[in-house]
Image (cartoon, coloured by chain):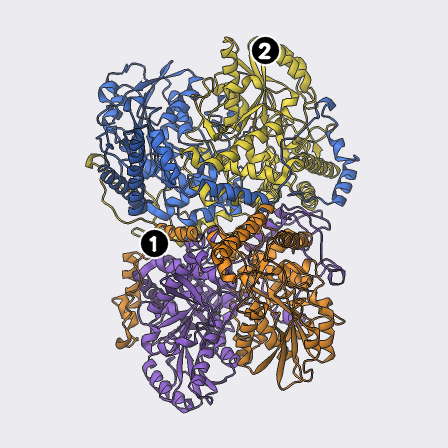
Chain colours: A purple, B yellow, C orange, D blue
Amino acid sequence: MNTLSAVSRPELEPTIFDLSASGRRATAQAPALANCTVPANLRRRVRPRLPEVSELQALRHYTRLSRLNFSIDTNFYPLGSCTMKYNPRGCNQYAMLPEFLGHHPYAHASLSQGFLESLFELQEMLCDVTGMKAVSLTPMAGAQGEFAGVAMIRAFHRQRGDFHRDEIIVTQAAHGTNPATASMCGFKVVEVPCDATGDCDIEALKRVAGPRTAGIMLTNPSTLGVFERHIAEIRSIVHGVGGLLYYDGANLNAILGIVRPGDMGFDVIHMNLHKTFATPHGGGGPGSGAVGVAERLAPFLPIPVVAKSAEGYRFLDERDCPLSIGRLSGFMGNAGVLLRAYIYIRMIGREGLRRVGEFATLNANYLMARLQQAGFQVAFPARRATHEFIVTLKAESRDLGVTATDVAKRLLDFGYHAPTTYFPLLVPECLLIEPTETESRETLDGFAVTLEAILNEAREDVSRLKEAPYTLPVRRLDDVRAAKQLELVWRPDP
Amino acid sequence: MNTLSAVSRPELEPTIFDLSASGRRATAQAPALANCTVPANLRRRVRPRLPEVSELQALRHYTRLSRLNFSIDTNFYPLGSCTMKYNPRGCNQYAMLPEFLGHHPYAHASLSQGFLESLFELQEMLCDVTGMKAVSLTPMAGAQGEFAGVAMIRAFHRQRGDFHRDEIIVTQAAHGTNPATASMCGFKVVEVPCDATGDCDIEALKRVAGPRTAGIMLTNPSTLGVFERHIAEIRSIVHGVGGLLYYDGANLNAILGIVRPGDMGFDVIHMNLHKTFATPHGGGGPGSGAVGVAERLAPFLPIPVVAKSAEGYRFLDERDCPLSIGRLSGFMGNAGVLLRAYIYIRMIGREGLRRVGEFATLNANYLMARLQQAGFQVAFPARRATHEFIVTLKAESRDLGVTATDVAKRLLDFGYHAPTTYFPLLVPECLLIEPTETESRETLDGFAVTLEAILNEAREDVSRLKEAPYTLPVRRLDDVRAAKQLELVWRPDP
Amino acid sequence: MPFIPHTVEDVRSMLSIIGVSSIDDLFDEVPKALRASFLDNIPPALSEMEIGRIMSDRAARDGHVLNFIGAGAYEHHIPAAVWAIVTRGEIYTAYTPYQAEASQGTLQTIFEYQTMLASLTGMEVANASLYDGASALAEACLMSVRANKKLHQSRILLPKAVHPQYRRCTQGICELQKITFETIDFDPLSGRTSWSAFSSAESAGLTAVVIQQPNFFGIYEDVDALTDWAHQHGALVIAVVNPTSLAVLRPPGDWGAKGADIVIGEGQPLGVPLSGGGPYFGFMTTRMEHVRQMPGRIVGKTVDLEGRPGYALTLQAREQHIRRGKATSNICTNQGLLMSAATIYLSIVGAEGLERVANASMAKTQMLMDRLSAVPGIHFPLDGARFHEVVMSVPVPPERLLEQLANRGIAGGYDLTHDYPELGYCLLVCATETKTDLDINRYVAAVTDVLNSLQAAGA
Amino acid sequence: MPFIPHTVEDVRSMLSIIGVSSIDDLFDEVPKALRASFLDNIPPALSEMEIGRIMSDRAARDGHVLNFIGAGAYEHHIPAAVWAIVTRGEIYTAYTPYQAEASQGTLQTIFEYQTMLASLTGMEVANASLYDGASALAEACLMSVRANKKLHQSRILLPKAVHPQYRRCTQGICELQKITFETIDFDPLSGRTSWSAFSSAESAGLTAVVIQQPNFFGIYEDVDALTDWAHQHGALVIAVVNPTSLAVLRPPGDWGAKGADIVIGEGQPLGVPLSGGGPYFGFMTTRMEHVRQMPGRIVGKTVDLEGRPGYALTLQAREQHIRRGKATSNICTNQGLLMSAATIYLSIVGAEGLERVANASMAKTQMLMDRLSAVPGIHFPLDGARFHEVVMSVPVPPERLLEQLANRGIAGGYDLTHDYPELGYCLLVCATETKTDLDINRYVAAVTDVLNSLQAAGA
Ligand SMILES: Cc1ncc(COP(=O)(O)O)c(C=O)c1O
Ligand SMILES: Cc1ncc(COP(=O)(O)O)c(C=O)c1O
């Protein structure tokens, strides 16, 4: 290299393997040498390809990599359906006390009372928040909560000797995990459409509901960003044919303290603690998909569940819960996530829970109003937004050739994470926008102004958007190539 | 705002006051309300100007601000004389155990044995590392260590009834804190020049040393990046006239395990634990300037010092040490920094200490050789580099008009922190480069290649350097304006 | 209002822009009858200080325990740098990297992780994590059914020496898809899966066999023979492995003549704290030929429109958000943070460090056995070669011993009597590199002491 | 080699490029006779795990203590976010912002800090931190001499009710520059600095007076009268303040008719953990007219060559690296990290939060006094109005009480007998907002219990 040009975007970071040098051992991490006692025939012959780097190299590499991410802590992140709100640092600090971190899941109950007490109280509080009778905390994400829920529905019918119910109804707007879960549980998936106002098409529901209906999976507010107004009717239709109502709690944030799934008539629900209860999303996880049930489903809850007695707290297992659908994890689900959710709820308290629902809704309706004023078309203009709402770029796409992806990518240039795009599938060129209650009005204003400016930019020169982003470490990436020329692991240059 | 242009540099971050909104109270941090019992005449009337922001706003703001910094964890940081090496995270983790953090400095000795044991062992280890007889850990940075050292020199002479020594000798290359400290201690500062090879001018020293000489302050290796070869002679000259030798330990990293200040004949030294012993620099501090002394100066050490007896460890205070120069802080200096240094030394151990000196020296000599090959002029080409060395741009400045500042600023564009510039003052247009032992050869190579390319760039078009940096949140800043139109606090727009 | 930044004035003006007069009006589509929301059992808000104090007190109550339990969750030293990095906001508070350009940090980390895990297990590709080891086994079984399509009924051999909770979890999840599991007994002398039981299993129409190495008892299975037998009978081999052990054990990719087909395991030993059972993460690797049957996120390398390299989620057509009811799995949120921790852990310790961790753990367990052998009434019934865990027979009901050890601040082992009554009074005990000489002595002394007093009380 | 990344091959080729054959050759300028370097007392290296275990054991030995000591270092709740941010590598491992363009994060933080501290103290400018409160008082005294140049000898009034260690530290440091300090007694009934002693001090040629508010006993001084008197006699006023108290107390800028001239204090209460005595930070603020006499770093706002705003170190001509022997101070490295912590702390709690912390601490100390009043033998000799600290008289030598309380896991107070023998058996006790009702009861019960047993033993 002899001359240089100014770096105009953040440097790419080499892979950790590019930093590796054979024979480098620069950590204070290895324990003292001990002989390998593995029998010769079982012994590994070639060392695995792990990096040989110094601690500083590793630290610097992953620190620099981290800086290539958008995150709540650095950016407004209105990713619809994901509830990207502030993750209070107190939750992390107190869930990571050395004693909790060192706690073995199979430690004797007498060494676990502090941990178990917290989980027990969390179960109780979640019952109250949702209006359900019992809760199990073990599912490790929303989708696993769904699995537990649908498995309980199945177990419930079978326990009553009803083996013929082999269908689960989902709405057209359902999140992909709903039908995927129903299939995983061995059910046939029956889809019902939504009407023009975003509610479930009741007539269609009536047509498909019947003796083969094991249950229906609903999100309310739905993923269309509206509150399902026919919920009472849906309940009587499904219950009427002997089916159960499953509540996908991904959108619980919208109605916290306002209306409870139990009161709407749901029989079984999951909650995404990483959304509603502000545990961090960790770049993709961990989450927690705690499940709640009505009385009649309580015996089927997945184990372990924490119980309280005169002697203290303990885990219930298969011996205590013979009808349980069983275990979904090797231990206690995402226990550390549960501590964070517990601390969060205690910190916002009764009043705070209600405010979550209120202010999440206020922010969404405000941002929707602002964007409507700016000329954006929302999917359901006659409806209230819940905690989120949908902008559709159908007209812009037709008139200007601009897509939801283009707008999303251009937003990144201005430091805003994009809303969810192309979900729900039934709204064309959609942006599902969820501001959450922890963002300030100023942030929403800045976002609205930027979106408006991007629209203007599209009107002037749509190619500007097509090639966005410009300011990130990489320009628009070629997804097609990623899938066609599969490069899934690093290989040394030949 | 109606149209946007792509952001080509990181966005500026508004101040926290710009984010503030009157009446915002969005933390879970305030304790319950209690009445104010301050007498009316003493009560505050107008609230102080503190931000009113949400926790997320504060977190996001300072997270984003932090990203505008270069640091060891993100960049090579060859800032000469500052020893910017890896700060092992283990030191931080174990110094921040909840029990240590919660430990009150005046807690009863029986509640402090774990803390005191660590400090005591650190004292002992530092004695061994430096060849001194006793150590006090209380000075809070190098400059305070210097103060303690010179104050001890003064106390030593006075204790012997010698009140006439009112001069401290420093070399021309001395760090600014040396003369500043001597003045603070009430001494006259006498400067001796260095010779063309970077060593002290012995004849000049002989001329100034005499009955008024209280002592000499030396850094060895000196801030010229060379080892003072006449150290034995200096010692006999100064000791010969009844003066003492003070060792400025800022460069101790270079000789760790190779040669000890005590063995060189120094009577009193300070160490910069934040340099040599890898405690973090924290954006400007905290540091620690532990002092070590020869036997005859031990009674004068600043307090508190930790002592060990059959009953355990305890702090010595004025009652135990009547000749002590006294206290330099309200409590125990930068105790948490001391724990970090202690952990660091235990982790690298006896062998590791020696390797620090060896590899810091290897890296500096290697980088010096590389840069010489690339056409750079070093200040003392006939000498070995120690842990650092000086490049002088005297020729480039004359021929091309490029300054050390220009090169420094241009380096920033390529992700390298600049070396120390314009220090030591006696080498024109200098870059004092200290790579430290924790950087890899690859990093040094990358740096050398970049410096070479910058030099080429200067040859082609010097204006390119004059306006650097280009890629940072701000372009070259106007220091003159900063000093002339003093704006030292934020004020709302009128 | 904790965490809600709105001022009174904000609320007023926002409502007016929306065109309503109160926040309550925004809920006018919610049927009145449903609006109840009694949250009587939720206590009022606490400050961070108050709940922090409660949690600190609870943590102190559980105490600093000297732990000798393994049984699938292992206490290893975690370099401080690991969690210092993963709790950085940019990692901790990002989500699934849907917007690749704004998520290169997460994506490249996953790509590096995939490389490390594939190499560690001797396979070609890895996914970006599953929930945990147990549920990963369930996913592997479901995957084996998709990958071994020739069969119209699904049967899987599941040795009894596989972790009992993994078996429960897997059976529970897979049963709904009509997979039948057949249990294979272990040899009571060696603790290895019984070769005679295995090789005499009905081999026709087998979908897959599960092999855990080392098995739940810490004993090495004869993986080559088992793998070859399975492949001879057209079954896929699902390997369940402890990732630490792979520093010293032949990786599943090298088992038998052709190697295992799907490898899964609990990733917790790689830099994830015990933390009461989670969050951990499951890993899964396989051969390229099966990649389209693999559940979970996968990251691929690609280029941007200037040709610069970059990373993106790929093969998304397998996933629920595209394929819905026909997806390979319903998994969406995974265990990304823990995957990041593992990647950093592996980078810092490296292959040699991991090898030392494995060897030191074996040595410590051996030391524990040697010293316990001298305690009257204690013996070690299984004689197969072992990794870092051992079945220990005790002269009293394990529960009573464990309770007394707990009173002394020791987590003494995993009680095997419920899962393996045929073993009699047995515990599963583990010592990793974290245990010092003194720790082991303390354990041995406590066991001796408790047994003496229990026997004295019994006498 | 912990932390040293060189491979054997690196070393070989680097040496060959340098042109030497061994690392040892690089030290050929070091006189042979000096090369000894016995490091016999340094133990061999430990792994992070091993030293981590040692430190954890030592921490556990010191234990979770219930703390009622203040005396200049106060236990307040610190929002978790504070240290989560300041330990980010970009803050933790940067240094003094010499390269302004690459340090805007640190610089802007300092600028914000300067604004907050100036406002909190009612002054116009602040520096970027000094080492701690005690040494800041020394710097303030030296500064007052520079600022009040008209005098050729320097005399400063230093009340006895100022923190004794501050006085020692200040006298020790300033004495070398021939400043003389005159002690002013306190009124034994109220605990306030005695007005008669103060106003009858020799007023001619006074450089400055020091006023601590609240004073070391937690008692409010009559700051207006003292300030006005000092100004009338041409002396500068150096205020020593607790920053938490300034949420509710009139700031030094408002004292008397003209306000204090230099304000210093210990910044620790603002988000810095007790941590055995440090690192803390000293703050200093003053009026614009004195800014060129102020020691320490100062940040100013400026513009870059495109006119964008930015921040840089300024007025560097005051500092040692420019002015050398004539600098305002020798300070170089300061306490930047703690200054950052304080800035974030103040941002999160805000003015209202700080006010609540102050009021709650006062209320808790009052509660403690109320309950202790019922304990026989205990009384509170000083009747001045107080902030969150109180002098408590006990019927036994305080050391014996404190030792017994320590055995019960309680840090019971600061023993005043050495610094103030005239007070008899007295302790200084403090309860902040961190103390619960139960904590206070536990303290009162422990004191009662210890006194009973000591008296029984004595009887
Ligand atoms: C509506 C809805 N349902 C279910 C899920 C699945 O939850 P998880 O990702 O936690 O498995 C999501 C998550 O994105 C969702 O948005
Ligand atoms: C040679 C030298 N001496 C003394 C000091 C002063 O040390 P400190 O900054 O810790 O006060 C420094 C610091 O930069 C230095 O480089």
Residue designated by label 1:
B26
C366 horizontally vs A172: left or right: right
Give the mark nearer the N terminus: 1 vs 2.
1
Q: Amino acid at mark 2?
A: Gly
Residue designated by label 2:
B242
Residue under mark 1: which chain is it in? B
Q: Is residue D348 above or below residue B280?
A: below
C105 horizontally vs B63: left or right: right
Kind of element beneath mark 2: loop
| Nearer to us: label 1 or label 2 | 2
Q: Is residue D273 above or below residue A470?
A: above
Residue B469 pos. (x, y %): 57, 44
> How many circles with numbers are drawn on the protein?
2
- Ligand 2, what quadrant? top right
Q: Amino acid at mark 1?
A: Ala
Marks 1 and 2 share the same chain: yes
Residue D376 seen in render: yes
Disc 1/disc 2 C-alpha distance (Å): 65 Å
Residue at mark 2: C-beta within 8 A of ligand 2: no
| Crowd tier of the residue under label 1, counting other residues whose Cα lies within 10 Å: few below 14, some 14–19, many 20 or above | many
D421 horizontally vs D96: left or right: left
Residue A28 or residue B378, whichever sits in front? A28
Residue under mark 2: which chain is it in? B
